[in-house]
Amino acid sequence: MIPMVDLKDQYAEIREEIQTGLNDLLESCHFILGSNVHAFEQEAANYLGVKHAIGVASGTDALHLALLAAGVKKGDEVITTAFTFIATAEAIRYIGATPVFVDIDPDTFNIDPEQIEAAITKKTTAILPVHLFGQPAEMERLQAICKKHELKLVEDCAQSFGASINDNQTGSMGISAGFSFFPSKNLGAFGDGGLVTTDDDVVADRLHMLRNHGSNVRYHHDVIGYNSRLDEIQAVILRAKLKRIDQYNERRRRLAVSYSKQLSDLPVQTPYEDNRGIHVYHQYTLLSEHRNDIMQALQNNEIASTIYYPIPLHRQNVFADQYKNLQLPVTEDISRRCFSIPIYPELSDQNICKIVDVIRSVFS
Ligand SMILES: *Cc1c(COP(=O)(O)O)cnc(C)c1O
């Protein structure tokens, strides 16, 4: 069986370092907001090129708190994409704001900057792009739109740790950004975890309070906050993996190049690549009219494949009534044709060839 992701080999390589770190932590019994979280926040901020990184309990919380700290309020409209995981829109709704879905670019699968201005109203206060599958969104265009209309730019970096565009890391280009450390993400913890980044001291201050019951000084509470801290156990794991994230992402990129080269003569659309964006391939996602046949053939050969995402957010039951008149033709077309095949740093070149051979067999 070739799974979508296999976390065991990655653990095996760093087992000793993690076990030593966890052992020290268990002996110290300092489990909440201790030295590992502080060190990880510093190391992540350095890596990402931001002034502040604040550990939180999950990627979903990271987005929620990133929007709140940026000043998004109840009744606001936030422009985003419907071709993403539900958490992107949930974070907006937690605040009582409304997600306004804009269609995507058919090549990058990210929000189409061309269509954003038509969706801006008096209530719009922010744009929340997603760097989907590890492909950076068109940040320069989004920054220009935000500047012109005085909107906040908040990034969903749940799938893009280490991705960059024009030499800027994702998570460093807006007022704030949310990352996820769900175990299968490019930088994955051994449980839930997340991170919010910002260069703004005031926003960082708010985030430190929001994640910890509205408090910066113990038992002094300035706002209604949350219990949303990254815990020390996850920070131990993340510190070990952060040291190796470039190596992990480079391997993903090498595998993607290999897939795209070998699949180039088949009737499938391989992921978009250009010279500006460094795609970190959280997923390797193809488009094909023959999706069902390909996925069936892969399954027959014990190779996993998954559709990310079969139902765009505006067609999900939870949102269906609210958006019944909304048409997003590109999003809908792509969700009908997309499917993702295994990619993770420990996947062997040999298995890439095997997967390609099975796909090829569908067309011969
Ligand atoms: C994983 C993910 C999230 C949520 O992260 P969690 O850590 O699972 O809460 C948000 N947005 C996108 C695009 C994701 O892929």
Image: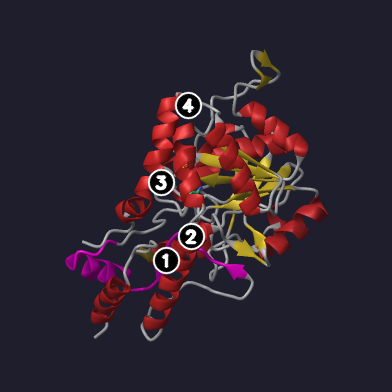
Q: How dense is the environment of label 3, judged by Cα within 10 Å: few (below 14), some, or many (20 and up)?
A: some
Which residue bears the numbered disc 4?
A: 31
User: 287 left or right of 179?
Assistant: left
Q: Which residues are magenta?
A: 277-304
Quadrant for the C terminus, please. bottom left
Q: What's the amino acid at mark 3?
A: Glu
Circle 1 — which element?
strand
Q: How dense is the environment of label 4, judged by Cα within 10 Å: few (below 14), some, or many (20 and up)?
A: some
Q: What is the spatial separation of the Cα atoms under label 2 and label 4, in whole angstroms?
A: 32 Å
Q: What is the spatial separation of the Cα atoms under label 2 and label 1, in whole angstroms?
A: 7 Å
Which residue bears the numbered disc 2?
A: 133
Q: How dense is the environment of label 1, judged by Cα within 10 Å: few (below 14), some, or many (20 and up)?
A: many
- Which is nearer the eye, 180 or 99? 180
Circle 3 — which element?
helix
- Which is nearer the eye, 143 or 248? 248
- Which is nearer the eye, 172 or 102? 172
